[in-house]
Amino acid sequence: MKIVGISKARSIFGQGAGNKALQLSEFPSGDWVRALNSVHASTHSTAKRSFHVSNNFILVACPDDEIQLQIEIFNELCIRADEKLEIQIAEEKERKKQQIEEIERKDKLADEIIKNLKF
């Protein structure tokens, strides 16, 4: 995911730190938005600005002369959010795999116990 443009119609120019609508390359999932919020929260910078995601836009409150800086910051945050989400997905896949293996192990154990019973 990355910033691919800015919406003139959704942005406020010439009025101090009005919202600027930075367009994302695709519509983000809820998990991706949570990852973006997480990496943003852990970022420490004097250029850090409040934001929210609406559809495929990041709305960031910043002055006009700071738009390029915010594009660069949010492109970096997008990369970090992508990485964080990939790690979360891989960890969840591994947890599910381990759960399935545990169920299969217990099922095999039950089969062994049952096959040795005499009725």
Image: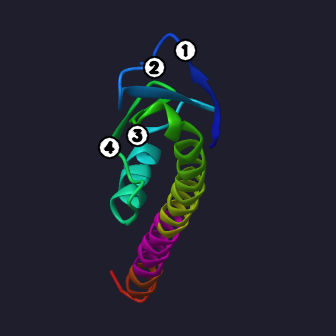
Residue under the image location 49 percent in, 31 percent down: 64
Disc 3 and disc 1 in contact, CB within 8 angstroms: no
For this rendering, which residue is in front, 58 or 49? Answer: 49
Q: Secondary structure at mark 4?
A: loop
Q: Which mark is residue 55?
A: none
Amino acid marked by disc 2: Phe
Crowd rating for badge 2 (residues with CA inside 10 Å; few <14, some 14–19, many 20+) = some
Disc 4 and disc 1 in contact, CB within 8 angstroms: no
Q: Is residue 79 left or right of residue 66?
A: right
Residue of label 1 = 8
Q: Which mark is residue 30?
A: 3
Q: Compared to 27, does 70 lie above or below?
A: below
Residue of label 2 = 13
Disc 2 and disc 1 in contact, CB within 8 angstroms: yes
Q: State which mark lies toward you, 3 or 2.
A: 2
Q: Position of residue 86 (x, y in %)?
A: 57, 60
Stretch of the chain drawn in magenta: 92-107
Crowd rating for badge 3 (residues with CA inside 10 Å; few <14, some 14–19, many 20+) = few
For this rendering, which residue is in front, 59 or 45? Answer: 45
Residue of label 4 = 50
Q: Secondary structure at mark 3?
A: helix
Q: Position of residue 37 (x, y in %)?
A: 36, 51
Q: State which mark lies toward you, 3 or 4.
A: 4
Mark 3 and mark 1 lie on one chain; the one further toward the N terminus is 1
Amino acid marked by disc 4: Ser
For this rendering, which residue is in front, 114 or 42? Answer: 42
